[in-house]
Amino acid sequence: MLTPTQPYVDYDDLIQEDPEFGFRINHHLYKDDEIFQQEMERIFYKGWVYIGHETEIPNPNDYVVRVMGQRPVILSRGQDGKVRVLENKCRHRGNTVCQEQRGNSKFFRCAYHGWVFSNTGELAEMTHPSNYGERMPAEGTMNLLEAPRIDSHRGFIFASLAAEGQPFKEYLGRAADYIDRYCDLAPDGEISLSAGRHGISYRGNWKMQLENLTDAYHAEYTHATALAAFAANSSAGKGKFTDRGDLEDQLSTQRDLGGGHAVLDGFALNRAQGDKLRFTGSTGTLSEEIVGKIAEREGSREKAVWLTHGGGSHITVFPNLMILWDAVRTIQPVSLHEAVIYYHPAQLKGASQEINTARIMSHQAGFGPAGFLAPDDMEMFERTQAGTVSDTDPWIYLNRGLSSQRIEKDDFGVDALTSQNLGETTQRGIWRHYKHVMSGE
Ligand code: FES
Ligand SMILES: [Fe+2]
């Protein structure tokens, strides 16, 4: 395994903070294979990663296949009802044992030589066992390997392939408040990701999406066409959606939550503007149906209005989970130069079918394969990757908002490093944490 002491990769050298030039990162972070391999080990195999949602596997024997880093796994709710993350790797010759994306099965049968594993991981049947003679593997030694740590928060399941390490609660940190708020916008206080997912791949490094979700700066330019189209059809008022002033509003903030987690916080702006579309953005959450149901749940109409008019936010949970508007997204690194983004429409439990259908339609319009928003970002990621070939100046400076950022109480009354939304406070937070993890600190 690679170690941080190897002279070739020095993360102090690649991610620098200095009073003279501010904050800068070296573009080798996007194009060096050794770095990619170290990321898999240190971020995706040692640390906590988001793996799936409980509503994707609600019943005994339900499963979905996932990839942790580059390792294929099965998120399985066993016959015993317990959720496990099993390595999708036969203990005979190492074939993947489950090829379907999702399903319901008590067993996974390896197609190569027919070994059968239960969905709790045990080797249930070995074909022609007598041929092993006295070399027969001992009972229990050929079970599917299982992620030693698994935990969840509001239905979001995370796992770690390392037996020991940072406790889950500490890892999730301040991201928990923002996940809670997103779920609180559902009448039952829960979301469902049972509608399925689609993936879009791009030829660029996985970290480009990690940085992009809390980059409000790009929206006006990268998504100019979509914003113009939305404005033309917006009940919030023609042209309002593309007002430069909205992005420059001081109530529109971005926050570094620590631990690599970051957020675009539109709560205050949404409440101030009675926003119908911008960062509130969760279809249906301003409807009387939802406000009324939440008022009933909370026992207070005032609280319901405060919650729903604040809306959701753009949340990045390091390293691979993003939550915004009508959907949950995951980042799947494929190789140094390729990643897949999976999109899961988020349904509101307790809401009418009409609202949940509208949410899927709205999500599709923006982030479907022919959506108005997702392809714009992918194109930018590919162009950024193309630019890394030129080594003349390898530095990328992330100094926006650096001189004006401050510690400020967020919507939960907790101090957070904050700047105006057009800054790069969130990117700096992500990179600071990345450096911490990659340096093995
Ligand atoms: S590789 Fe799975 S049974 Fe041989
Ligand atoms: Fe974007």
Image (tube, rainbow, N blue to C red):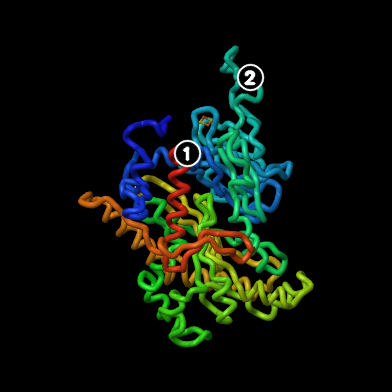
Residue 4 in sight: yes
- Residue positioned 51% across, 75% down in the render: 278
Say which element carries label 1: helix
Establish whether ligand 2 lies closer than 8 Å to the Cβ of label 1: no
The percent coordinates of residue 59 (x first, y second) are 70, 51
Residue 321 visible in the current orientation? no
**What is the total number of numbered labels drawn onto the structure image?**
2
Question: Tag 2: Cα neighbours inside 10 Å, few (<14), some, or many (≥20)?
Answer: few
Residue 1 falls left or right of residue 351: left
**Amino acid type of the residue that numbered disc 2 sits on in the rendered structure:** Ala
Q: Quadrant of the N terminus?
A: top left
Q: Image quadrant of residue 9?
A: top left
User: Would the CB of label 2 be found within 8 Å of ligand 1?
Assistant: no
Cα distance in 3D space between marks 2 and 1: 32 Å
Of residue 414 and residue 238, the one placed in the foreground of this image is 414
Is 317 left or right of 295, judged from the image as shown?
left
The disc, 2 or 1, on the residue closer to the chain's N-terminal end is 1
Q: Residue furthest front?
A: 19
- Position of residue 11 measured from the top left corner of the image (x, y, whole percent): 38, 41
Identify the residue at horizontal 43%, vertical 50% (top origin): 431
Mark 1 Cα-neighbour bin, 10 Å: few <14, some 14–19, many ≥20: some
Q: Which residue is mark 1?
A: 42
From the viewer's perspective, is the residue at label 2 or at label 1 nearer?
Answer: 1
For the point 46% across and 43% down, the residue is 436
SS at mark 2? loop
Instruction: State the residue lying farthest toward the left.
Output: 392
Give the numbered dot on residue 138. Answer: 2
Picture coordinates of residue 69 (x, y %)? Answer: 47, 43
Q: Is residue 111 above or below residue 375?
A: above
The residue most toward the bottom is 238
Q: Would residue 387 appear left or right of 88 to someone viewing this image?
A: left
In this view, the residue in front, 205 or 113, is 205
